[in-house]
Image (cartoon, rainbow, N blue to C red):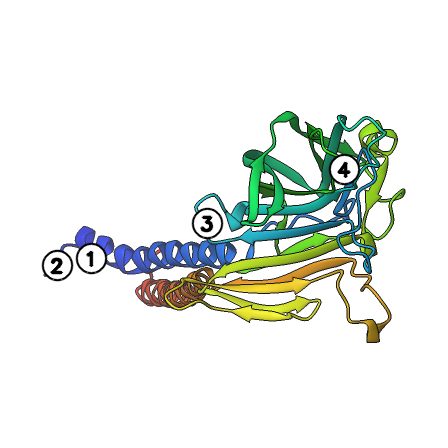
Amino acid sequence: MIPKSLSLLLKSAVVLFPLLAGGFLTFLGGERLYEANAVQVEKWTAPFGLLAFSSTQLAPITDSDKQCIKMQIKLDMKAKEANVLQGIARCEVFLDFSLPSYDGKEETEEDIYVGVQFPFRVVNLRNLQLAWKRLSTEGETLIEIPTKSVNVSVVEENDLVTSVFCVGFIRSQTTERQDISLVFNFEWEDLICREGFSTFTCTLPVALAAGSEFAHPYTQNPNARYVYHTETLGLTVDMTFPMDFEIKQAYPQIEIMRTETGSDGRSLFWEINAEPETYGGSKAIQLVSVDFEDNRLSETRNRLMFDSGLFMGLGIALILSGIHEAVRVVAEMREKGKPI
């Protein structure tokens, strides 16, 4: 015979264990479900767009073209400095512009300021190279130009964050036209917005007008006497994504997608302000946007959803089993006339 106290203890265990275990598993499954679906998505506001400016009038790149600056932006999401989860992309900028020739009677030495307004926040500016591309009988020679000043100022206005980069240098003492090349790197924050657990959007706004899209207080900045956008700014954008990032949608339509042999990434390419004459001039593109998904995070979410279903299924089954045992024990005790 089993002692009554031991029998009561066993019956209690049969009831309490599935209830406690079921409650724990159900909680664990609910936690996994919350983790897979509860992603904080910040509201996106359209900031001031991308444009370039200078303190002196720049010469057109070609005689038949209105473009005065060619800007190439290369965004690398797979670089070690990039962090998609934090909305940070590594960026490299190439600027090509020309200082006009002089007639020989004017003063040839002057301070020149050239800059770019970047939407969002620019940090860790580095590797700046400024050079004069001089042509000779032996070909093109790059002559380094010393800089007087280099700075990035962050303007925060009405919850909009804009970064203004500006470099100052002295024009060389020569009357001939000078073709200048400027290259620099930085990290670009808030360019990538998280839309879900594994989905993201990379959005680069482009300025369509000078006055209304120039961040205060730089509207009246003496270094920004001439502003370049749309048809006067030759803009190309190159975005590189890891191979495990799936491109869902892009605007405007991707012009070139390339994957180099042995590379662990793919590149998307747009030529924004260069349009064949048959289309009636430059394109008025407000932004470049790419929706993409991180397949590794997608697999993590699928695993969380599977674990959630498994744990909650087992937990609810155990809870029901515990309730059933509790009802059975109560019924037995009533049949025997024992107080409950």
- Disc nearest the viewer among 3 and 1: 3
Q: Secondary structure at mark 4?
A: loop
Q: Which residue is mark 3?
A: 79
Residue shown at the point (64%, 57%) measured from the top left:
237
Residue shown at the point (56%, 35%) measured from the top left:
128
Q: Which mark is residue 114?
A: none
Q: Secondary structure at mark 3?
A: loop
Circle 1 residues within 10 Å: few <14, some 14–19, many ≥20: few
Furthest residue to the bottom? 278
First in residue order: circle 4 vs circle 3: 3
Q: Which residue is mark 4?
A: 159
Q: Secondary structure at mark 1?
A: helix
Circle 2 residues within 10 Å: few <14, some 14–19, many ≥20: few
Residue shown at the point (38%, 67%) measured from the top left:
310
Question: How far separated are the C-alphas under marks 2 and 3?
Answer: 70 Å
Q: Which mark is residue 2?
A: 2
